[in-house]
Image (tube, rainbow, N blue to C red):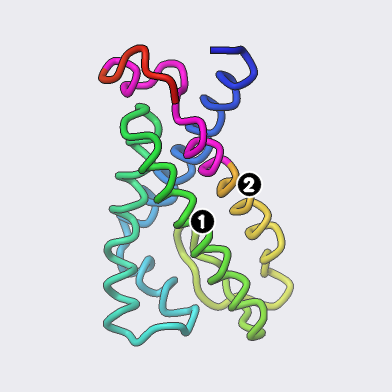
Amino acid sequence: MKPLPAVLGIAARLALGGVLVAAGGIKVVDLDASVRSVVAYDLFSYPIAEFIGITLPIVEISIGLLLLVGLLIRPSAAVGAGLMVIFIAGIASAWARGLTIDCGCFGDGGPVSENQTKYAQEIARDVGLTLAGLYLFIRPRTPFALDNKLQPDRNS
């Protein structure tokens, strides 16, 4: 593997996987706050928002761990990138509707004062993570990945 693709692959795995594990880990210890974060977007009925708030941290941790260890990289990257696109849409929707909320990406979300919103930065971060996921989807073969042990000498 050439040096630049190898470095980009590892960086993409660590970035996307690390962010997903961190975000999910923070939320999973306070599921009530996770549910409140989803409710704050005012997009779903309470039962659906509750389901999302409870299951999202588990999905984030699972996908993040798969990426960090390099297992099932292509499907994990697709799910990770898909989550980021959904997060971008949610943040953009809140911004467009004039809601003043914290995204809840890393714990407590919910109402904040207008000068505390960081929609542009949050969208930019998630665009970068989406690109990391897309890179891994296209080039899932990275050094130090368990996939390499399970599928040696396979060109992807």
Mark 2–mark 1 Cα distance, whole angstroms, equals 9 Å
Magenta stretch: helix, strand or loop mostly: helix
Nearer the observer, 31 or 14:
14
Nearer the observer, 133 or 98:
133
- At label 1, the amino acid type is Met
Q: Residue 145 carries which label?
A: none
Instruction: Name the spot of residue 122 as percent of width and height, x first.
Output: 63, 58
Disc 1 marks which residue? Answer: 84
Q: In this view, does 82 lie above or below 15?
A: below
In magenta stretch: residue 42: no
Other-residue count near label 2 (Cα within 10 Å), few / some / many at <14 / 14–19 / ≥20: some
Relative side of 114 to 154, left or right: right
Q: Is mark 2 on a helix, strand or loop?
A: helix
Disc 2 marks which residue? Answer: 128
Which quadrant would the C terminus be assigned to in this image?
A: top left
Residue drawn at (37%, 18%), measured in percent from left and top?
A: 154
Instruction: Name the spot of residue 7 as percent of width and height, x first.
Output: 59, 20
Nearer the observer, 50 or 12:
12
Relative side of 110 to 69, left or right: right
> Mark 2 or mark 1, which has the lower sequence index?
1
Task: Read off the magenta span.
Answer: 132-149
> How many numbered badges does the structure rendering display?
2
Residue drawn at (27%, 72%), measured in percent from left and top?
A: 51
